[in-house]
Image (tube, rainbow, N blue to C red):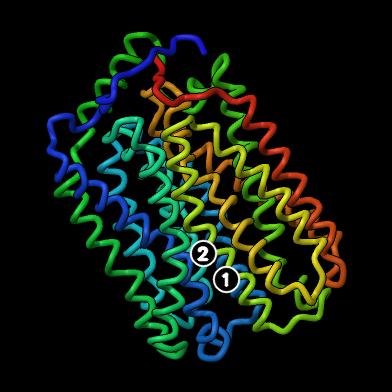
């Protein structure tokens, strides 16, 4: 690519004077907030029993509450991207952590109110939508490129760990104690906000200087100026790549247990054991592919997305008496789905540094928006008795994602002017 130069190992743009210990504490602060950002998606699991039995919400109402939360995440991507580009990523992440905590607590005011739940979860969704695009660029700012893929993978893997932790907490406290479960999602983000305030270096001055320099050049830092020239095609490419990930993953993962039970006649226990193996593989896959991205290049994990497509195809070839093979293949698929582990670093590096507050979030969540439109259309043409079209879609889209990725630039040991 034009205007690219090789960097040194110390290509840190934020907190260069910090000790390694302080930098690690800053990373842990980001990780705490990101973990409980992931964990907040468990609120639906924590509260749906109470919503139906205590608050007498219908199934349609409960689904609407969390559908609006999803819409909020898309809005939050744009909103907090702009805020971050004005006041800095550290301050924005602190605001996000506090907002996640406060808005999650709002339903306590009138838990029987469907309107209050809807408004609260929508606003929470907005805060959640800004998390990836703020947290990942902070990691990229504070650490050399040779570590970014691994660190981004560690952060990404927190989603799997948060879901496991949420299941453990749910089993410990029980479905009737929804208030106690909610507090486990309310208090920790505030702890993360305090940690971020203390340990993360402030990038407000750096952000202000970037804006002033852009103004002198007659340019305003924003999405329109970011998507110019070759960066328009790069931007569209990464959004399509993210859409491939979300669409294929949801088409497969959300329907695999139903396929095993309805189409192959397996019991729920057996189907669940197969599905659980995918989560184990995925956790290790994030770390493996993140490390590969640091060592050999950000595009090397495209091997993983291609293998994911092959794995899903093989999944449809097995029969009901091949349970062990299903379990092994589930680990294989999950492991390769970890290809996205280094995306936080990759998406932060693809655009000039002045756009780092904007690029990662829209590149990641923009794909989620496309997936939320495409997948229901395909699912609407599929019956529960024949889920094969969804698996064919997943396999094909994974492979197509590998093709898209192959045409995107490499960023390891490079930086934009």
The reply to whether discs 1 and 2 touch (Cβ–Cβ < 8 Å) is yes
**Callout 1: helix, strand or loop?**
helix
Horizontal side of 392 relative to 135 (left or right) equals right
In front of the other: 23 or 325: 325
- Disc number placed over residue 405 in the picture, else none: none
Could you tell me residue 412's position as x and y percent?
Answer: 43, 26
Could you tell me residue 338's position as x and y percent?
Answer: 53, 50
Viewer can see residue 382: yes
Residue at x-position 46% and y-position 41%? 342
Task: Please give the residue where the numbered disc 2 appears in the rendered image.
Answer: 280
Task: Please give the residue where the numbered disc 1 appears in the rendered image.
Answer: 276
Q: Is residue 342 above or below residue 351?
A: below
Q: Which quadrant, please, contains the C terminus? A: top left
Other residues around mark 1 within 10 Å, as few (<14) / some (14–19) / many (≥20): some
Viewer can see residue 116: no
Residue at x-position 13% and y-position 36%? 18
Where is residue 184, by image quadrant? bottom left
Could you tell me residue 191's position as x and y percent?
Answer: 22, 62
Residue at x-position 53% and y-position 42%? 364
Horizontal side of 44 relative to 12 (left or right) equals right
Q: Is residue 89 above or below residue 110?
A: above
Other residues around mark 2 within 10 Å, as few (<14) / some (14–19) / many (≥20): some
In front of the other: 209 or 107: 209
**Callout 2: helix, strand or loop?**
helix
In front of the other: 197 or 272: 272
Q: Is residue 390 above or below residue 141?
A: below
In front of the other: 409 or 286: 286
Q: How many numbered tags mark residues here? A: 2
Mark-to-mark CA distance, 1 and 2? 7 Å
Residue at x-position 39% and y-position 20%? 415
Q: Is residue 113 above or below residue 132?
A: below
């Amino acid at each position: 690519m034009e205007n690219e130069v090789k960097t040194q190992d110390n290509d840190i743009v934020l907190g260069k004077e910090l000790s390694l210990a302080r930098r690690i504490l800053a990373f842990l602060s980001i990780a705490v907030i990101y973990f409980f950002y992931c964990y907040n998606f468990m609120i639906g699991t924590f509260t749906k029993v109470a919503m139906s039995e205590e608050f007498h919400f219908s199934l349609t109402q409960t689904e609407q509450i969390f559908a609006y939360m999803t819409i909020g995440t898309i809005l939050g991507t744009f909103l907090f991207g702009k805020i971050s580009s004005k006041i800095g990523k550290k301050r924005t992440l602190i605001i996000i952590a506090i907002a996640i905590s406060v808005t999650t607590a709002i339903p306590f005011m009138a838990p029987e109110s469907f309107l209050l739940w809807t408004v609260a979860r929508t606003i929470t969704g907005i805060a959640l939508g800004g998390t990836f695009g703020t947290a990942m660029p902070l990691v990229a700012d504070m650490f050399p490129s040779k570590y970014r893929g691994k660190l981004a993978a560690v952060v990404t893997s927190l989603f799997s760990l948060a879901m496991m932790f949420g299941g453990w907490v749910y089993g410990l406290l029980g479905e009737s104690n929804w208030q106690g479960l909610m507090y486990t999602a309310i208090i920790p983000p505030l702890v993360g906000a305090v940690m971020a305030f203390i340990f993360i270096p402030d990038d407000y001055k750096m952000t202000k200087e970037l804006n002033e320099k852009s103004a002198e050049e007659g340019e305003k830092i924003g999405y329109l100026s970011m998507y110019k020239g070759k960066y328009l095609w790069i931007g569209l490419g990464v959004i399509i790549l993210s859409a491939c990930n979300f669409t294929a993953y949801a088409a497969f993962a959300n329907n695999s247990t139903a396929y095993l039970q309805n189409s192959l006649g397996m019991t729920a226990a057996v189907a669940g054991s197969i599905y659980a193996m995918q989560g184990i593989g995925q956790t290790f896959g994030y770390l493996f592919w993140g490390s590969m991205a640091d060592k050999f290049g950000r595009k090397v994990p495209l091997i993983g997305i291609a293998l994911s497509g092959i794995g899903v195809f093989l999944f449809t070839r097995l029969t009901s008496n091949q349970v062990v093979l299903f379990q092994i293949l589930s680990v294989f698929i999950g492991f390769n789905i970890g290809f996205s582990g280094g995306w936080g670093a990759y998406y932060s590096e693809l655009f000039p540094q002045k756009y780092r507050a904007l690029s990662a979030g829209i590149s990641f969540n923009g794909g989620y928006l496309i997936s939320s439109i495409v997948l229901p259309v395909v699912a609407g043409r599929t019956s529960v008795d024949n889920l094969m079209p969804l698996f064919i879609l997943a396999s094909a889209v994974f492979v197509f994602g590998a093709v898209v990725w192959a045409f995107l630039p490499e960023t390891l040991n490079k930086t934009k002017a």
